[in-house]
């Protein structure tokens, strides 16, 4: 089929725009990767683009040398796995139940679930609630409060409503109960939206550090993100010490300033985002389908 000149020009323009979007999207991340692999003192002079000028692993050594690093990784991974699984079970179960128009008190449950989405008691009442429930300094403080998200439930519910009703009716005629219908029919057909919610839940659990800051004081329960936050603060203190020694003419300035807050922040960014960056390509196609189909009912 012959392609007109205008269509060829349109395709070329689309390719140029897409390349431009890829460049402006990837450049900040690659720049931070280069900064994280560059000597901290050299980074201060600027000019780091896509490759390190003075290659070094010292920034990552500083991040990984934290005594709580290994334990925090285990806590964060356990939190992501358990929190995501529990969230999927609760969100999917609630979404399926609320698709039933004959469910007693269906509208009441929807109102009860939607109110906390718009109205929050604030940090202080939340602190006293967690304390009353004995969640302070407990691993479940990472899991239970984030086990159900109303917005995700609405996405899953809308997706389930888009599935043919005849599938459930046929299963009921064959003698299947609600649990069997959900586990053997609804869930397998809802993989796109399940992958989307899985990604959202995993990212939320992985990136959260404020829960450790507000509700956890035991070092063996700190998450990786909170440890990274502490490493950045320690790097800033290290920089202040280096500057103070430089002004007083003390020795050891070069050793201290080799690792700067800027380089530590870059290394922290790479460490914190790399797992999600590696996970997203495998879920991308499901993510797009899940958002589109779950947001608009056909």
Image (cartoon, rainbow, N blue to C red):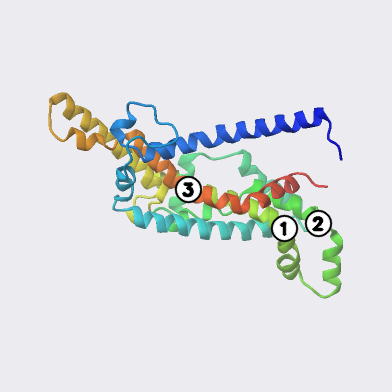
**Marks 1 and 2: CB-CB under 8 Å?**
yes
Labelled disc at residue 6: none
Badge 1: how crowded within 10 Å, few (<14), some, or many (20+)? some
Q: Which residue is mark 1?
A: 190
53 versus 86 height, above or below: above
Front disc: 3 or 2: 3
Which residue is more in the foreground, 47 or 264? 47
Q: Who comes first in sequence, dot 3 or dot 1?
A: 1
**Label 1 to label 2, Cα distance in Å?**
9 Å
Residue under pointer 2? 163
Question: Counting residues from the N terminus, which is met first, the one under dot 3 or under dot 2?
Answer: 2
Q: Residue at x 78, y 58 (%)?
A: 103
Q: Position of residue 13 (x, y in %)?
A: 71, 29
Q: Which residue is mark 3?
A: 274
Q: Quadrant of residue 8?
A: top right
Q: Position of residue 50 (x, y in %)?
A: 45, 35
Residue 1 pos. (x, y %)? 87, 40
């Amino acid at each position: 089929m012959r392609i007109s000149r205008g269509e060829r020009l349109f395709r070329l323009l689309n390719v140029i725009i897409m390349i431009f979007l890829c460049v402006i999207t990837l450049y900040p991340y690659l720049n931070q990767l280069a900064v994280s692999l560059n000597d901290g003192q050299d980074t201060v002079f600027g000019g780091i683009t896509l490759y390190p000028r003075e290659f070094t692993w010292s920034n990552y050594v500083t991040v990984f040398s934290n005594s709580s690093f290994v334990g925090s990784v285990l806590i964060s991974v356990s939190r992501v796995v358990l929190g995501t699984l529990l969230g999927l079970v609760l969100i999917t179960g609630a979404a399926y139940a609320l698709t039933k128009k004959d469910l007693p008190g269906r509208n009441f449950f929807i109102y009860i679930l939607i109110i906390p989405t718009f109205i929050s008691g604030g940090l202080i009442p939340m602190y006293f609630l967690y304390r009353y429930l004995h969640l302070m300094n407990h691993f479940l403080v990472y899991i239970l409060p984030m086990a159900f998200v109303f917005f995700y439930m609405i996405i899953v519910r809308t997706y389930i409503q888009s599935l043919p009703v005849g599938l459930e009716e046929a299963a009921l005629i064959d003698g299947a109960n609600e649990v069997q219908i959900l586990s053997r029919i609804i869930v397998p057909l809802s993989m796109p939206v399940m992958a989307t919610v899985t990604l959202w839940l995993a990212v939320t659990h992985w990136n959260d550090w404020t829960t450790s800051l507000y509700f956890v004081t035991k070092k063996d329960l700190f998450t990786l993100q909170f440890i990274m936050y502490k490493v950045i603060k320690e790097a800033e203190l290290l920089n202040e010490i280096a500057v103070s020694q430089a002004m007083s003419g003390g020795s050891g300035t070069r050793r201290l300033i080799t690792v700067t807050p800027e380089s530590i922040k870059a290394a922290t960014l790479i460490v914190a985002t790399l797992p999600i960056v590696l996970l997203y390509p495998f879920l991308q196609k499901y993510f797009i389908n899940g958002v589109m189909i779950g947001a608009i009912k056909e």
